[in-house]
Image (cartoon, grey):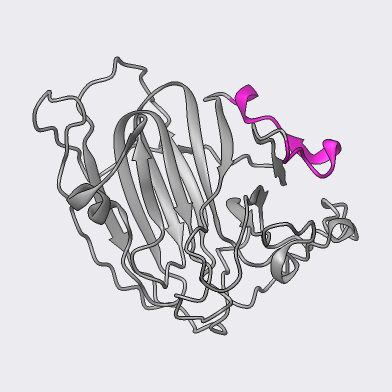
Amino acid sequence: MKNIKKLVKTLAAVSTIGLGFATVSVGQAQAASLVPNQEGEIQLTNPDLQCLDPSYCIDTTTLDFGYSVTSLEYDTDGKGLQFGKSRLFSDDRSTTNDGTDGSFDLTRFGISFYGTDEGTNPAVGTNWFRAVAYEQGETDPFEDGRLEVGRFKFDFEETANEVRLNYFDVEDAGFSGILEVNGQALSGQQLTDMLLPAGPDSNIQTLVLRNVNDLVVQMGNPGPDSVFGSTGDGVSLQVSVPESENVIGLSALAVAGVITLKRRKKASKKA
């Protein structure tokens, strides 16, 4: 049986519209994942990032708890390779995605998802959001699609009473996390609290938000300012809401964080 070490951290609550201090419990009801349970590419709102294959294009606005996703620019530091907007997929790493097992054949588009990735390996049989990074001006994905880095805005069709974000395999501190909530860019201590620390290989870190209409998330960190050098730190993401989700009016935003560090057998240190 694997040895699992847990570290729990509660972050400071903040109010975005001055309605005072709010709290959120670390415990949760049964969660309903917003990651589609079928594999495919997430339909983005970006006109220049239409799905590679319409047959495997997932319209998330049609889900029970509908939302839309927009890919955003994130690499503007001028250091090393510069990356543009990323694509986003729902991926279960137990499938090859090369068409041989009836799965989405991504190899036609220069993307090769391995059953065992060089660095980012969520549990098999579960779907995670998986970003695919592209260098600016390039049409072929970086590292055959295996650098899981991107910035995305999620717009919910209804106010979410609670949103949980599970980040998998954050190994660069201060990059992955939440950058904006309900149209407000985080800054100062609020931003510091929402950017995750580095953990061991295959760690899972969870952020919890309440009363959310939209949010901007950063997944991973491209090089060269990475523990992996020019390659960068790839990160996967799961987003969920309680199954008993109630839609309520916008009030104070409460933020809490739970960091669960799961020590697993070390994978190769390459995202």
**In the figure, 91 relative to 14: above or below?**
below
Is 250 displayed left or right of 165 in the figure?
A: left
Is 187 displayed left or right of 136 in the figure?
A: left
x then y, percent, for residue 154:
49, 35
Judging depth in this view, the residue of 251 and 18 nearest the camera is 18
Q: Would you say residue 126 is visible in this rendering?
A: no
Q: Would you say residue 16 is visible in this rendering?
A: yes
x then y, percent, for residue 16:
21, 30
Is 20 displayed left or right of 127 in the figure?
A: left
Quadrant in which the N terminus appears: bottom left
x then y, percent, for residue 65:
52, 25
Judging depth in this view, the residue of 137 and 30 nearest the camera is 137
Is 5 displayed left or right of 97 in the figure?
A: left
Q: Quadrant of residue 7?
A: bottom left
Magenta residues, start to end: 48-63
Q: Residue at x 51, y 81 (%)?
A: 228
**In the figure, 266 relative to 247: above or below?**
below
Q: Quadrant of residue 184?
A: top left
x then y, percent, for residue 124:
62, 62
